[in-house]
Image (cartoon, rainbow, N blue to C red):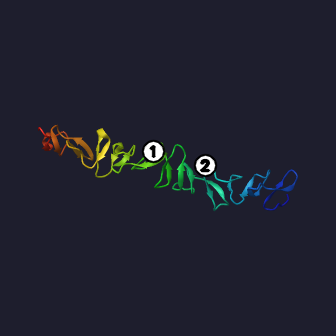
């Protein structure tokens, strides 16, 4: 074996030092394309020097300008950790506050399938399927749920009472009450009763 300078490799067939591809700072052969290090402005991905890292990889400037893999689900990222994502692959949703990609969205957000984001629920909702207060599936503290409207409200409407944060019907003719469907719990009556 012969020793070749940094930007050359030993051609095993003719036993001569040949110049590496211009993208390679150093290479190994058998051709001039098997890079070990890249020239300025290029990033090592396997043994190939690229102008940019492919989807799901990031430029790691600490490790000889290598392209390293992003955390699972991240299509673009700033590093290898789960909280360094900038965008997600198709079946994942991006949560901008934590910079994470997941199959599900955290409480107070919903899966925005159009934009592939975890978007904020209405402030009345702790869980929801959309941005409107009528898209709630669970309410935030101090709100009560009206199941027939899938809506969260601060005060139950006339004729309903909040029982365990769910608006339930008062006894027929009651405007306000302390228990659901109980005539003796009426505090005031609707007009005509």
Residue 38 spot, x, y in % from top left: 71, 58
Tell whether 13 sits left or right of 109: right
Q: Which residue bears the numbered disc 2?
A: 55
State the residue at coordinates (53%, 53%): 86
Picture quadrant of residue 182: top left
Q: Secondary structure at mark 2?
A: loop
State the residue at coordinates (17%, 39%): 171
Which callout, 1 or 2, points at the residue further toward the start of the chain? 2
Residue 158 spot, x, y in % from top left: 20, 43
What is the total number of numbered labels drawn onto the structure image?
A: 2
Real-space CA distance between mark 1 and mark 2, rounded to the nearest whole angstrom? 22 Å
Q: Residue furthest left?
A: 193
Tell whether 190 sits left or right of 62: left
Q: Secondary structure at mark 1?
A: strand
Q: Residues within 10 Å of mark 1 (few under 14, many from 20)?
A: some
Q: Are marks 1 and 2 in contact (CB under 8 Å)?
A: no
State the residue at coordinates (31%, 43%): 151
Q: Is residue 7 above or below residue 110?
A: below
Picture quadrant of residue 159: top left
State the residue at coordinates (53%, 50%): 87
Q: Residues within 10 Å of mark 2 (few under 14, many from 20)?
A: some
Mark carried by residue 88: none
Tell whether 107 sits left or right of 79: left
Q: Which residue bears the numbered disc 1?
A: 112
Picture quadrant of residue 157: top left
Q: Assign the C terminus to one quadrant of the image.
A: top left
Q: Assign the N terminus to one quadrant of the image.
A: bottom right
Tell whether 9 sits left or right of 180: right
Residue 114 spot, x, y in % from top left: 48, 42
């Amino acid at each position: 074996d012969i020793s070749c300078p940094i930007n050359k490799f030993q051609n095993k067939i003719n036993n001569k030092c040949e110049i590496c591809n211009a993208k390679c700072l150093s290479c190994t052969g058998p051709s001039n394309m098997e890079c070990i290090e890249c020239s300025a402005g290029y990033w090592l991905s396997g043994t190939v020097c690229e102008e940019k890292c492919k989807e799901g990889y990031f430029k790691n400037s600490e490790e000889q300008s290598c392209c390293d893999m992003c955390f699972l689900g991240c299509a673009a990222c700033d590093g290898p950790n789960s909280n360094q994502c900038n965008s997600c692959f198709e079946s994942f949703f991006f949560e901008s506050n934590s910079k994470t990609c997941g199959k599900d969205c955290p409480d107070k957000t919903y899966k925005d399938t159009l934009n592939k984001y975890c978007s904020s629920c209405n402030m009345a909702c702790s869980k929801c399927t959309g941005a409107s207060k009528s898209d709630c599936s669970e309410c935030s503290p101090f709100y009560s749920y009206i199941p027939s409207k899938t809506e969260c409200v601060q005060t139950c409407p006339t004729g309903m009472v909040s029982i365990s944060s769910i608006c339930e019907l008062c006894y027929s003719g009651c405007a306000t009450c302390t228990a659901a469907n109980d005539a003796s719990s009426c505090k005031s009556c609707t007009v005509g009763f």
